[in-house]
Image (cartoon, grey):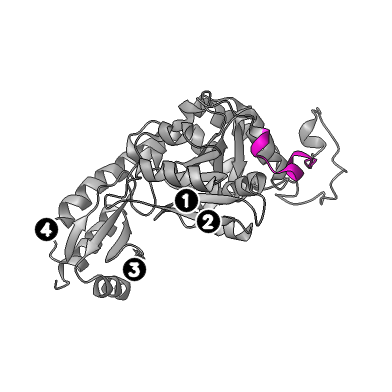
Amino acid sequence: MKDFNINNLVRKNILELQPYLSFRDHNQFNSPILLDANESAYGALNRYPDSTQKKLKQKVSELKNISEKQIAIGNGSDELIDLIVKVFCEPKKDTVLVMNPSFAMYGFYASINENKILKLDLDENFEIDKEEFLKISGAQKPKVFFLCSPNNPTGNAVEDIEFYVKNFDGVVVVDEAYIEFSGKKSNIRLLEKYSNLIVLQTFSKAWGMAGARVGCAYASKEVITLINTVKAPYNVNSVSLNNIIQSIDNKHKTESHIQNTLNEILWLKNNLQSINCIKKIYPTDANFFLIEFINVGQVYQKLLENEILTSKRDPQIPNCIRINVGSREENKRLVEILKNIES
């Protein structure tokens, strides 16, 4: 374990920044008359949401067995990615390391912040070459490493994540958007050991709450304080907060949905294996498959003609399409169309 003073990695102006504090959210009252925020006295949603998201953090704390002070709530994981770049990366100076291929938004937000993007190419099995990682990170000294596991769009989980955390002289962000489908343990368990680790999770995937746009960052208290300093004061709306709380209170429904998805993953894989136009189905730890086709352009167009929307990854990943696992009805329709495509 490396001994990090996290403040040495933070932009100086962020350390000096005073966060916006909502008076009402940082004090307790019994029956207040709210005349402080220029809200309307009328309407179903006339009051601003809790800027500290206390109720949701309490629920998530119990769910993940982690202190509320180690949780930041974002308007989706996208906002948290953006905030992490803003906290740690000096514009036009610092470098961000990303897996290639991986989730495009890491590079997107780095580009907005005018940071250099360094790509760590994955091997033919979409795994990281550890020697290449050590070489690149040692020579280029990137400030933040975004590590997606299970990785989007390849679907596979990254093995031995602790190796990358302990051998990186910056902040490692492990994005676990698909962790519930993988059967892998969350890297939240490593937070007490490594102060340079941030773990991202979302309610958009397994929880079926993509429309609510709520993500979570888990890290040391110091890092969470920094993220909360930079975030907008009312970044998650009341409707989303209440819906996520209700979803956690009824987590047995989510557990049932996850099991249904896992069943569909097996069903779909079995039914795709005999289709002529498919050359390779890559192993997945997520709720999607990366599939190599013999005639990718024709396949993608045929699916589109039948209003089946997929994610074409060619030419970045040659001849490949990423296909989400849907309901049984949707999966049957997908298989039916693919079977009618000549190889």
Give the alpha-carbon distance from disc 4 to disc 1, as whole Å: 35 Å
The residue depicted at 16 percent of the width and 71 percent of the height is: 340
Mark 1 Cα-neighbour bin, 10 Å: few <14, some 14–19, many ≥20: many
Q: Amino acid at mark 2?
A: Ile
Front label number (2 vs 4): 2
Q: Dividing the picture into quarters, in which one does residue 242 lie?
A: top right
Q: Range of the magenta residues?
A: 7-20
Q: Amino acid at mark 3?
A: Pro
Which callout, 2 or 4, points at the residue further toward the start of the chain?
2
Q: Which residue is mark 1?
A: 98
Give the alpha-carbon distance from disc 1 to disc 2, as whole Å: 7 Å
Q: Position of residue 97 (x, y in %)?
A: 50, 49
Are the residues tagged 1 and 3 within 8 Å (C-beta)?
no
Is disc 4 placed on a helix, strand or loop? loop
Q: Which residue is mark 3?
A: 315
Are the residues tagged 4 and 3 within 8 Å (C-beta)?
no
